[in-house]
Image (spheres, rainbow, N blue to C red):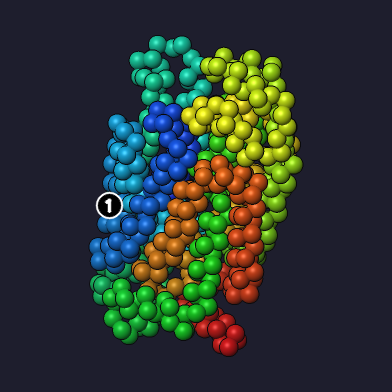
């Protein structure tokens, strides 16, 4: 591997670490759900607010990031984002109240734009033949971060059963969720330090007419005989923007007639990726597994399997994205997602729930267990029916605090089938639409508008993600898990139909060649 290739790989790896911090930040909250719900007495919607607070923060951050990455540059904007992750991790771990925790996590959401900016930066320094692999590194780091979060949460849960003095001294038992969220502090600090060693984006330097500096950066990542051609291609791409570089003019270009196919592809995949419900599963993993009636410890353990599956199939997708191409991975991957969600829907739909007198007698932590006498040996046909019966018998607070344990005892469910369905869904997502969306975002927009276009469509996918996270606890409490999963499958199906018609293949093409292919597709559709 030549020195320029090593440099491109090194810079991409450092920037892609933002994906690791994102995954860690996103998934650590999954382990805290029961603890913060009990400590702050949260309702379903309040819990959704805590979990989705970063999703709300990123909605505000992305327009600002779009402006910052064009005015300050990609590197400086990434440094600001790393600092936000660090401050958010510290304040989340120390949050004294529900609203301060929401505010701290909202602050972290301001940093979630790291995903779009990482894809943008890597897409601008990666050679065309390496672009798919290097951009997908961000997604690999996301799933490694997710896996690390699930493992950290599981490890902390296991420590709760220990009588070791140091565990008491550190207050792990009393402040379990704070230790979970605080585990992000060290990696966030490390990423911020490493970002000082990356160069400025050559595309941004050309955007600012700083040609000499752009050549200096390109000398680190390209052979000498390719630099002049690369600069000319970047200049030519930017000449397409004749109205100036204001945000409004670039947004107008995104919605202009010549960009219609690009708009349809980007909008559809931005919505469909999060409409799969992936963040409902990832951010509430132990809660979802408790629906299988396997108990808290087992639920945290199964969450680790989600992380491991994510890593394996993201790597597999990375290895194949430049061999099979973007379109096959998207089309077949979304089909796989629909089938997986269908398996989960069937498994939950055919489950039943019956609590016995013996089950109730084993619950030493629940007071006044006679309140459950009216539902003893009554068979309920769905999780929502059983939860409603618990609320009627125990009241909102006790039903919320003990529903996981009661479901574990009452569920008559094909847990293996559903576990296979969930892991299959995770595999399908991370093999296809998960990483490939970011690859497409780094490819389908001309340089002249990518500083606005990528954050804009990331804003769309973040908005969908926010609604999924915000309302998932409410959906579980009102629709039940089977109907919720069916809803996700239908949304993915609609997206699949649209992308089957409009999505083009972009592998091994320069950004300029991709623009010509999109124009050709537009002409064919007229």
Expressed as whole percent of the image width and height from the top left, the position of residue 415 reads: 70, 35
Q: Residue at x 48, y 29 (%)?
A: 397
In the figure, 394 relative to 83: above or below?
above
Q: Please tell me in which quadrant of the rendered image residue 329 appears.
A: bottom right
* Up-down relation of residue 445 to residue 10 (above or below): below
Q: Position of residue 167 (x, y in %)?
A: 40, 17
Number of other residues with Cα within 10 Å of mark 1, as a class: few under 14, some 14 to 19, many 20 or more: some
Q: In which quadrant of the rendered view does residue 126 lie?
A: bottom left
Question: Which residue is located at x 52 percent, y 83 percent?
Answer: 519
Of residues 191 and 354, which is closer to you in this image? 354
Residue at 29%, 52% (x, y): give it: 79
Residue 397 horizontal side relative to residue 491, left or right: left
Answer with left or right where residue 218 lies relative to residue 493.
Answer: left
Q: Secondary structure at mark 1?
A: helix
Front position in the image: 124 or 346:
346
Image spot of residue 396 (x, y percent): 50, 32
User: Label 1 belongs to which residue?
Assistant: 80
Q: Residue at x 44, y 62 (%)?
A: 460
């Amino acid at each position: 591997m030549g020195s320029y290739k090593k440099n491109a790989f090194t810079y991409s790896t450092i920037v892609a670490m933002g994906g690791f911090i994102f995954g860690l930040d996103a998934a650590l909250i999954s382990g805290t759900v029961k603890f913060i719900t009990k400590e702050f007495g949260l309702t379903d919607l309040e819990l959704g607010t805590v979990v989705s607070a970063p999703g709300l923060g990123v909605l505000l951050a992305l327009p600002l990031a779009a402006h910052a990455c064009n005015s300050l540059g990609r590197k400086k904007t990434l440094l600001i984002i790393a600092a936000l992750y660090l401050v958010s991790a510290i304040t989340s771990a120390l949050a004294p109240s529900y609203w301060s925790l929401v505010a701290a996590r909202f602050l972290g959401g301001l940093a979630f734009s790291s995903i779009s900016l990482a894809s943008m930066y890597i897409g601008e320094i990666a050679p065309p033949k390496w672009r798919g692999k290097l951009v997908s590194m961000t997604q690999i780091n996301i799933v490694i971060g997710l896996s690390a979060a699930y493992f950290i949460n599981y490890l902390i849960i296991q420590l709760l059963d220990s009588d070791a003095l140091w565990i008491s001294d550190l207050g792990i038992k009393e402040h379990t969720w704070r230790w979970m969220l605080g585990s992000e502090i060290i990696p966030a600090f490390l990423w911020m330090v490493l970002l000082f060693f990356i160069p400025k984006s050559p595309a941004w330097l050309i955007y600012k007419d700083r040609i000499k500096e752009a050549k200096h950066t390109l000398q680190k990542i390209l052979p000498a005989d390719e630099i002049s051609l690369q600069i000319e291609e970047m200049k030519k791409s930017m000449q397409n923007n004749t109205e100036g570089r204001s945000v409004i003019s670039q947004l107008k270009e995104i919605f202009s007639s010549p960009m219609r196919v690009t708009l349809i592809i980007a909008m559809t995949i931005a919505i469909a990726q999060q409409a799969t419900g992936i963040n409902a599963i990832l951010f509430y993993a132990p809660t979802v597994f408790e629906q299988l009636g396997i108990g808290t410890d087992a639920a945290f353990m199964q969450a680790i399997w989600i992380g491991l599956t994510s890593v394996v199939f993201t790597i597999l997708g990375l290895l194949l994205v430049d061999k099979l191409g973007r379109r096959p991975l998207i089309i077949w991957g979304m089909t796989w997602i629909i089938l997986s969600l269908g398996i989960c829907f069937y498994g939950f739909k055919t489950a039943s729930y019956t609590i016995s007198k013996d089950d109730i007698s084993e619950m030493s932590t629940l007071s006044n267990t006679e309140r459950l006498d009216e539902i003893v040996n009554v068979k309920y046909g769905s999780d929502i029916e059983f939860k409603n019966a618990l609320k009627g018998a125990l009241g909102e607070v006790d039903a919320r605090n003990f529903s996981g344990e009661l479901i574990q005892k009452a569920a008559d469910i094909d847990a293996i089938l559903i576990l296979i369905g969930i892991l299959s869904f995770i595999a399908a997502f991370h093999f296809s639409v998960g990483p490939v969306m970011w690859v497409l975002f780094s490819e389908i927009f001309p340089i002249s508008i990518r500083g606005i276009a990528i954050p804009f469509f990331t804003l769309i996918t973040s908005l969908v993600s926010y609604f999924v996270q915000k309302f998932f606890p409410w959906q579980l409490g009102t629709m039940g898990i089977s109907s919720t999963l069916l809803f996700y499958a239908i949304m993915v199906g609609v997206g699949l139909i649209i992308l089957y018609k409009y999505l083009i293949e972009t592998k091994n093409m320069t950004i300029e060649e991709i623009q010509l292919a999109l124009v050709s597709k537009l002409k064919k559709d007229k």
